[in-house]
Amino acid sequence: MAQNETPQWYILHTYSGYEAMVKESLMRLIENNNLADQITDVKIPTEQTIEEKANGKKKVVERKLLPCYVFIKMIYSNQLWYLVTNTRGVTGFCGPQGRPIPMKEEEIRKMRLEDYVEDADFKVGDRVSIESGPLEGFVGVILELNDETQRAKVSIVMFGREQDVEVDYIQITKISPDAVEVPREEEECFYKLSLKVCK
């Protein structure tokens, strides 16, 4: 499969009941292998429904839109294919003969995997805060913008050194140029907290 440098959504099939564990394992995989710029999001789409109990009482419950499936946004490579498919609970990518096929735009919208920012007010040099995903809590400076894909290249400080990462517009919020920056050690802790490994 030809490599594409733009992250795309793919569908993973999992064993029944393993969806949350697979997502957690993938988030640890991102951290342990420094893959935040290659695997940019992992989601289990859910919806809220009203369920009526036998006693007539109604309760709001959250259900998975597609049980046994986890959605992963990544820049496909043979190495990532190996790492992801060897994650416990994953049976493989969805596609002909197990070959990953990127999701179509209408499929992404139907599964509500992404929100879109209209009239984005970002420019190169803006300071932004990353509000979601594995890099939630980091503050950085925009280096490049791609309005077509709604992705920004942002320079952040991770583990004491500058690193360029790509994030979706919907993941970032512009902040004041004179806002107080989070100390590096706290910034790293925020990163670990987002992956549920900060102690």
Image (cartoon, rainbow, N blue to C red):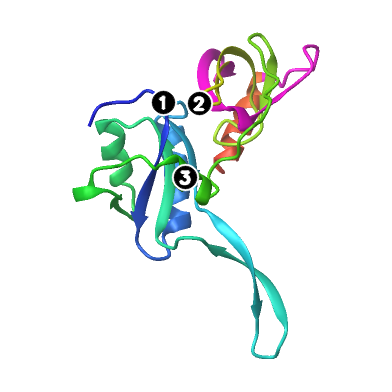
Residue position marked by numbered label 2 in the rendering: 149
Residue 41, horizontal then vertical, whole percent: 49, 38
Label disc, if present, on residue 168 of the rendered structure: none
Label disc, if present, on residue 106 of the rendered structure: 3
Residue reaching furthest bottom? 55
Q: Earlier in the sequence, mark 2 or mark 1?
A: 1
**In the drawing, does residue 196 fall left or right of residue 82?**
right
Residue 173 is covered by the magenta coloring: yes
Q: Which residues are magenta?
A: 155-183
Residue 10 is covered by the magenta coloring: no
Residue type at mark 3? Glu
Q: Compute the Cα span from label 2 to label 1.
A: 8 Å
Label disc, if present, on residue 6 of the rendered structure: 1
Residue type at mark 1? Thr
**In the drawing, does residue 115 fall left or right of residue 10?**
right
Q: Compute the Cα span from label 2 to label 3.
A: 15 Å
